[in-house]
Image: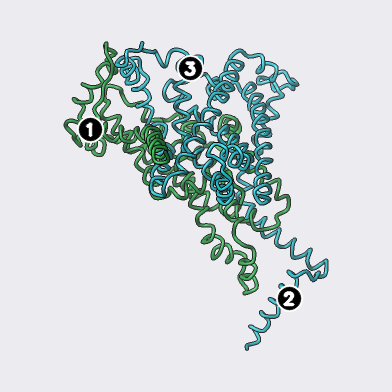
Chain colours: A green, B cyan
């Protein structure tokens, strides 16, 4: 009975697991297919003909042609790829400079009106972009930053989600440790850099991983703040690719998800820790 | 022993005396606390300055704008709010958003709980493998799957192909009310792993010995679930509901990328409406509805905060 139960549960899980993981596999194989092959399978979809689009699990004639075209002959893709990278790097760096100390200060010191700051962080982190869209627009307009990459970077730097995450992890450091460092004559900055940052590293990494994935997924912000196409991030470029070039489009979609995928593979434990930090109070 | 070390030892002793409970002179303690507070404030200030500039101050401006006319800037009381609430597009979008949440949340929560329970019964390696598979969608940008979604749900797409093979009638997924189902699917696909990890954290917090004791007393699997697991993770359910709810706003990405700013009526969400008002520069309507939405979400956050407060106490009592 127990064995059958276990087998059954593995079976159910496999079905759902395949469902969640299949798109990755699909994009990878699609990227390896030649345009001729892919057009053959997807003919009804592309040309709105009778019948239904088909697919082959593995490409019949795998080719790197689309990858080569992507890497050697599509400057747009790279411009937008670098836009995305620049925005991501800017946001992550900014959060190191501003969010990290703020989380530390909030977690470890009797800051006046601490509760107010904390609640503010939570409320801001929970508000969907649509609610703050108008406010952000008003500031960015005033600062003359609309239609520049800064319009995505600066509001992202001050998003409170990572402050909250790092706060949670910093709270878990035992006070005795900091106290004994103080007794040994360490200054507050020294404590922050020598104890806080290394001991809160898993929190910092969690914030980093989650924020990175979020940055590669930015759609709402560039959609309303960027008009100039050359500043678009990848996430707006991909859906624009002509449906007649299916193989190329799939190839682009795959390459675009490689960076977040790498971050996911390297940082899955931090991702999980970050998710859990939202639910369980330490 | 050098003088320096001696003095350090002395201060160490002094502090430990303070810890044990000897009360220091009130003024000195107060000063120390105040100084610490200021140090903390110095750490916080740059970050909170930015938050104030980019979020707080402009939001106050939005609140102000919600009470004045867009053209002319005259104070008009709650007129903007009345206009928004009476607006047909707003009503449709609010209704759709509410319906989406009411359908998605129970579905997502039940499914992920079921899968979490199944995953929990497995060995270490299988557990890790399945967790990775379920979390994978978090790493896939919406823009990358859009093409696949289009291919799947086109009238000539994969799903209809399979339906045809099974002898079922094809469905025009994106242009009928079936679009709603596509959106639900997309949300669940994306968030299954996230919620599953939350559930697993909850399940892990249930002490194992309680199960063993119940098992010895002859409690079956179902009894154990309903009498032990469920009551013990109850405080977490709230948290998970609220977190999933707030994540549900991000489903706009897929909806927008697949079917643009004016999708089929049943998936026209508040997010679409905000976007379109923004493009029309309807600042007054946007301001009023931003404030309304912020209020609603503020209430949810208060609930969440409350449920956070609950967790440690209850679990430490068990």
Q: Tell me the chain of label 1.
A: A
Decide which of B241, B7 is in the foreground and name it. Answer: B241
Position in image of residue A230 (x %, y %): 38, 33
**Label 2: which residue?**
B14
Q: Which residue is mark 3?
A: B262
Eye-nearest disc, 2 or 1: 1
Against A99, residue A184 (above or below) is below
Looking at the rendered structure, which numbered label has been put on residue B108? none
Residue A226 visible, this orientation: yes
Badge 3 crowding class, 10 Å Cα cut-off, few under 14, some 14 to 19, many 20 or more, is some
In this rendering, is residue A63 above or below B163? below
Q: Is residue B169 left or right of residue B240?
A: left
Check if mark 3's residue and mark 1's residue have beta carbons within 8 Å: no
Helix, strand or loop for disc 3: loop
Q: Nearer the viewer, mark 2 or mark 3?
A: 2
What residue does disc 1 label? A58
x, y percent for residue A255: 31, 38
Q: CA distance from mark 2 to mark 3?
A: 70 Å
């Amino acid at each position: 009975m127990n064995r059958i139960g276990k087998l059954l549960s593995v079976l159910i899980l496999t079905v759902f697991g395949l469902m969640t993981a299949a798109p990755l596999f699909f994009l990878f194989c699609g990227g390896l297919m030649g345009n001729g092959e892919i057009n053959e399978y997807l003919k009804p979809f592309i040309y709105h003909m009778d019948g239904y689009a088909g697919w082959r699990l593995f490409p019949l004639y795998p080719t790197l042609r689309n990858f080569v075209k992507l890497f050697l002959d599509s400057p747009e893709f790279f411009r937008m790829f670098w836009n995305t990278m620049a925005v991501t790097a800017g946001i992550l760096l900014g959060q190191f400079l501003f969010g990290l100390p703020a989380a530390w200060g909030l977690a470890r010191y009797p800051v006046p009106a601490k509760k107010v700051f904390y609640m503010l962080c939570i409320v801001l982190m929970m508000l969907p972009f649509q609610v703050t869209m108008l406010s952000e627009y008003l500031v960015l307009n005033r600062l003359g930053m609309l239609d520049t990459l800064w319009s995505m970077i600066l509001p992202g730097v001050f998003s409170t989600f990572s402050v909250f995450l790092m706060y949670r992890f910093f709270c878990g450091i035992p006070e005795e440790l900091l106290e004994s460092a103080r007794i040994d004559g360490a200054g507050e900055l020294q404590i922050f850099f020598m104890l806080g940052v290394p001991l809160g590293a898993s929190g910092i990494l969690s914030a980093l991983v989650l924020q990175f994935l979020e940055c590669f997924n930015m759609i709402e912000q560039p959609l309303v703040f960027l008009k100039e196409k050359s500043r678009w991030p990848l996430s707006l470029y991909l859906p624009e690719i002509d449906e007649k070039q299916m193989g190329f489009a799939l190839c682009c979609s795959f390459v675009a998800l490689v960076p977040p995928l790498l971050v996911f593979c390297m940082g899955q434990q931090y991702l999980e820790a970050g998710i859990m930090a939202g639910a369980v109070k330490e | 022993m050098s003088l320096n070390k001696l003095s350090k030892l002395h201060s160490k002793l002094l502090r430990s005396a303070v810890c044990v409970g000897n009360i220091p002179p009130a003024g000195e303690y107060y000063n120390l606390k105040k100084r610490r507070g200021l140090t903390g404030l110095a750490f916080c200030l740059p970050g909170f300055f930015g938050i104030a500039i980019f979020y707080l101050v402009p939001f106050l401006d939005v609140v102000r704008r919600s009470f004045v006319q867009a053209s002319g800037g005259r104070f008009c009381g709650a007129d903007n709010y009345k206009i928004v609430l009476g607006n047909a597009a707003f009503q449709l979008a609010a209704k759709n958003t509410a319906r989406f949440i009411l359908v998605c949340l129970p579905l997502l929560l039940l499914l992920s709980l079921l899968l979490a329970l199944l995953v929990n019964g497995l060995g270490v390696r299988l557990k890790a493998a399945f967790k990775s598979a379920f979390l994978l969608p978090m790493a896939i940008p919406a823009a990358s799957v859009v093409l696949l979604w289009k291919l799947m749900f086109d009238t000539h797409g994969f799903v209809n192909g399979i339906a045809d093979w099974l002898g079922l009638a094809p469905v025009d997924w994106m242009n009928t009310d079936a679009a709603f189902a596509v959106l639900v699917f997309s949300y669940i696909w994306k968030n299954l792993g996230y919620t599953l990890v939350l559930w697993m954290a909850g399940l892990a917090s249930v002490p194992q010995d309680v199960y063993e004791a119940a098992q010895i007393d002859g409690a079956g699997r179902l009894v154990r679930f309903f009498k032990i697991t469920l009551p013990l993770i109850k405080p977490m359910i709230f948290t998970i509901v609220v977190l999933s709810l707030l994540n549900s706003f991000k489903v706009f990405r897929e909806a927008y990328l697949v079917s643009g700013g004016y999708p089929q009526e049943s998936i026209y969400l508040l997010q679409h409406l905000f976007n379109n008002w923004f493009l029309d520069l309807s600042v007054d309507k946007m301001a009023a509805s931003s404030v309304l939405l912020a209020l609603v979400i503020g209430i949810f956050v208060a609930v969440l905060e409350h449920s956070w407060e609950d967790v440690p106490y209850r679990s430490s009592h068990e």
